[in-house]
Each structure stands twice: as structure tokens, then as C-alpha cells.
Image (cartoon, rainbow, N blue to C red):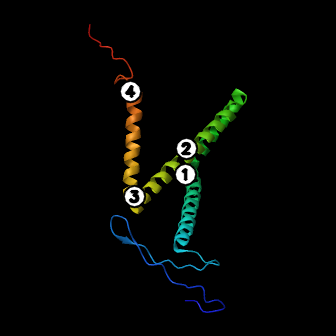
Amino acid sequence: GIHGASSDYVFEPLPPRYFGFFGKRTKPLERLQAEKVSQAEFIEQYHDENHALAWSIRLVSLVLMAAAFDMVLSPLSVLSDSLLILNYCTCGLGSVLDGAAQFVIAMAAVLLALVITTLTIAVAWFAARPGLSVLAVAAAVAAYMVFVRTHMKGGRTVPYHSMTA
């Protein structure tokens, strides 16, 4: 316990709990805070803070990954600057094409960052929560199958014409 002006506060770790399919145990939790809270409130506050920190790290990682992919694709950006030569004979078309190319390169960097970040988060979820991850994958596959079946009404989307007479 804590000894001092008030003896109402006790500083003891919460006991570890078992979770997951593989019998993992939680680490003992200890934290000082100004107010007295129940164990359930403490756990809820701890999970909320952990959740906010995890999503903050994911968002910062996404932005950093987009910047990294932008740097990787920067040689293409420099190459697209050569389109400005067209300005001499087309009255500004080179600038338009260069701007469009820069936009496409930036969007490619963001798209690559989104895909890689999503895959990284998914792999981390498979490691942390295998049961929930398998259910999410099963739900995504089922949604895809429903989407495919509803958009392929006759089995073929383009009519088949035989070349023989």
C-alpha cells in the first residue's frame, strides 16, 4: 500500500488473466491516478487509452509511409517535369500534363501507403486476435461472394458468339 497523508489508497497490481486460444496471460497492471476507481473502470480507462494510442500510431505510420512512398516515386515526378518542354509548342499543355502526372504519382503513393498499412494492421490483428481475425476474413469473403453472385446474373457478363457457322 501507499503510506502518506491518506491511507485510503492501495497500490496493488491487478492479477493477470488468461486470454486468447493459446492461454496467454496478461501482464500485471499498475498505475497511479488521482481518483479512486473500481477495477472495471480502471480496465475500461486502460483499454480506451491503449486504443487511442494504437490508432494514433497507425495514423502517424500511414502519413509517414505515404511520405516514404512519395520519396520512392520522386524519380517519376522528376521525369514528368520533362513534360514542361511541351509548353514551347502547345501554349501551356505541358503544364497541365505535368500537373496531372504529379497528381497521379501522389495518389499512387497514398494508395500504396493505404494498402501496405491495411495489410500491416491485418497481420497484427491475426497475431493479437486470431479468432476475431478469422471471423472478419470469413465475413469479407462471404460479402465478396454475395457481391459477385448479385453482379453476375446469367453467369456471363458478355454474350458468347460462336465463330462457327
Amino acid type shown at disc 2: Ala
Q: Amino acid at mark 4?
A: Met
Disc nearest the viewer among 4 and 1: 4
Q: Secondary structure at mark 4?
A: loop
Question: Residue 61 at x, y = what percent?
Answer: 55, 58
- For marks 1 and 3 on the same chain, the one whose residue lies earlier in the sequence: 1
In this figure, which residue is indicated by the disc labeled 3? Answer: 126
Cα–Cα span, label 2 and label 1: 8 Å
Nearest the eye: 151 or 66? 151
Element under disc 2: helix
Q: Nearer the viewer, mark 1 or mark 3?
A: 3
Number of residues whose C-alpha sits closer than 10 Å to that of mark 3, classed few (under 14), some (14–19) or many (20 or more): some
- Residue corresponding to mark 1: 69
Element on which disc 1 rests? helix
**Residue at mark 1 to residue at mark 3: CA–CA distance:** 25 Å
State the CA–CA distance, disc 4 to disc 2. 30 Å
Mark closer to the chain start, 4 or 1? 1
Task: Tell which circle, 2 or 3, labels the residue nearer the N-terminal end.
Answer: 2
Q: Are marks 4 and 2 in contact (CB under 8 Å)?
A: no
For marks 4 and 3, give the CA distance: 32 Å
Residue corresponding to mark 2: 108
Residue at point 60%, 92% (across, down): 3
Residue 108 position within the rendered picture, expressed as x and y whole percent measured from the top left: 55, 44
Q: Say if 91 sits above or below 104 in the image.
A: above
Q: Are marks 2 and 3 in contact (CB under 8 Å)?
A: no
Depth check, front residue: 56 or 162: 56
Of marks 2 and 1, which one's residue comes earlier in the chain? 1
